[in-house]
Amino acid sequence: MRTPIRRIPAAPAALSVLAALALAARVPGAPAQEDEDRYVAIHCGRLITGAGEEKEKVTLLVKNGKVERIGEKLTLPHPCEVIDAGGLTVMPGHLHLHSRLSLLDYPRAGMRADLKVIDEFLPAPGAFDAALQAGFTTLQLVAPGTTGIPGRCLVVRTADVGGGHAVDDDGAVKVNLLNPAQDRKLLADALVNAKKEIEKVEKARADFEAKKKAAEEAKKKEEEAKKQQPAPGGPPGQPPPPPPQPTPPPKADDPPKPPEPQPKPEEKPAEKPAEKKEEQFQPPPIAPPLQPFVDLIQKKPGSFAYVRLGGASSYLHFLEATRDFEIAHVLHPEVTPARGRPQAFSGVSGSDLDRVAGSFGERKELVVLAPYLSYLQGSVDYVNVPKAMAAAGARVALTPANDGAEELHAWRYNVAELVKGGMRRADALAAITKNAAEAAGVGDRLGTLEPGKDANLVLLTGDPFDVQTVVERVVIEGVVVWTRAKKTRS
């Protein structure tokens, strides 16, 4: 599977108004220095790290937006902002892996892997409010359209805390295989043509090296020929006479020699011609739409494909299209929710992904799924596809199916339905934390609460899979960016 991609370093997080006031209040009359470290301590009732641990009554210390350490009894630095979450559950902020929030909705088809979502990203004020209220700190904004290869993804924070929204503006290349009949050939051709681009560059490099070597050999022969030239007036083939011996120093009784004539002031020794710089290899340009696939084939760190699939047949088409190539990828199959009363038996839509769960598991695929129970294809019986995938050995990540406010607020409850339907709690927690961050290519800084990672947190009133649990606060890089309004009695 893929390695973490290149990341844009986050700028130091800016303080919220309340945090700034708290800092100023710590030392009366002395405002905080711009270059001093910023500490925030969060006293947690329960801490879900996302790395397989759940801790009770611990403190999480944040330094300059990063997790510094976690412990039961920590000695806090001074100054340090303190957040009392003793009655709350603290866990990594939620990630939405297939979003178009803040972007215009329009179709795009064909081979456009050179286009980037960052170039159309102009978020309006309040664009991410619904996501923040549901506990989402990170979104993967995908390129538009459900066919073809429409472009590169963008990973953003849902609040700007001083370093801008963008976390990774050169994310995964989105590949659609929802309709394999028309999309499979596009993917296969992209890989084949990218390989030709690589071969073109390699041939140009080989030609350059051969030309360089030939020039060096010719120069060497020329120098050898000069050494074999006869001295002036000497027979052919005879080497030049040896250089003159230095004149011995004069004896004490020898008369002094007259001074040697000096060159006139206006006369200057001839300057040596400037040495010619060694020519450097200039690779031929690569077609921009093919560059992401060149990176995939060459295993450039952080490059991966985010592949949208239909059912089981789409996965088989993906394997066929990539059989001659080993590329880093994340798979996102469609999952049809089993909601409402089923139609007649012949008209029931269902999922056949359980049939390829074993293949996903054998290959240790990282698979993104909507948190739904589905009908078995051609049946009115339920199937828990995420459970089947995780049980088979695949790494499952869960994400909302769309950007609707209702869907965002209900998605943890939908995950709870999967757990109720037999999915292991540990697998479900990994699916909404660690695996979700890896699926967006940001597992090196998000998804788990460990030293050195971004302090992106959601503070919940109870267990994440309890239907009565709500979001109390959202923290991004140590800054409280959203707090639930308290209802007051009139």
Image: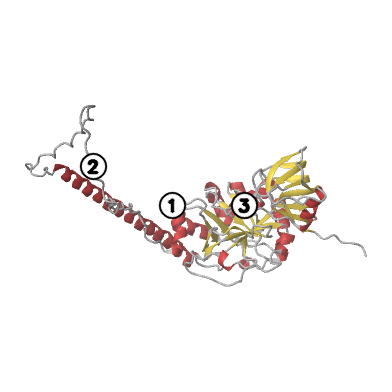
Which circle marks residue 256 in the picture?
A: none
Q: Secondary structure at mark 1?
A: loop
Distance from Cα at disc 3 to Cα at disc 2? 82 Å
Q: Quadrant of the C terminus?
A: bottom right
Q: Give the residue type at disc 2.
A: Glu
Residue 141 visible to an observer of this rendering? yes
Q: Earlier in the sequence, mark 3 or mark 2?
A: 2
Residue type at numbered disc 1: Gln
Q: Is residue 226 left or right of residue 36?
A: left
Q: Which residue is mark 3?
A: 437
Dot placed on the residue nearer the N-terminal end, 3 or 1:
1
Q: Earlier in the sequence, mark 2 or mark 1?
A: 2
Residues packed near mark 1 inside 10 Å, few (<14), some (14 to 19) or many (20 plus): some
Q: Position of residue 417 (x, y in %)?
A: 72, 55
Identify residue for label 1.
Answer: 298
Query: Percent x, y for residue 190?
Result: 43, 62
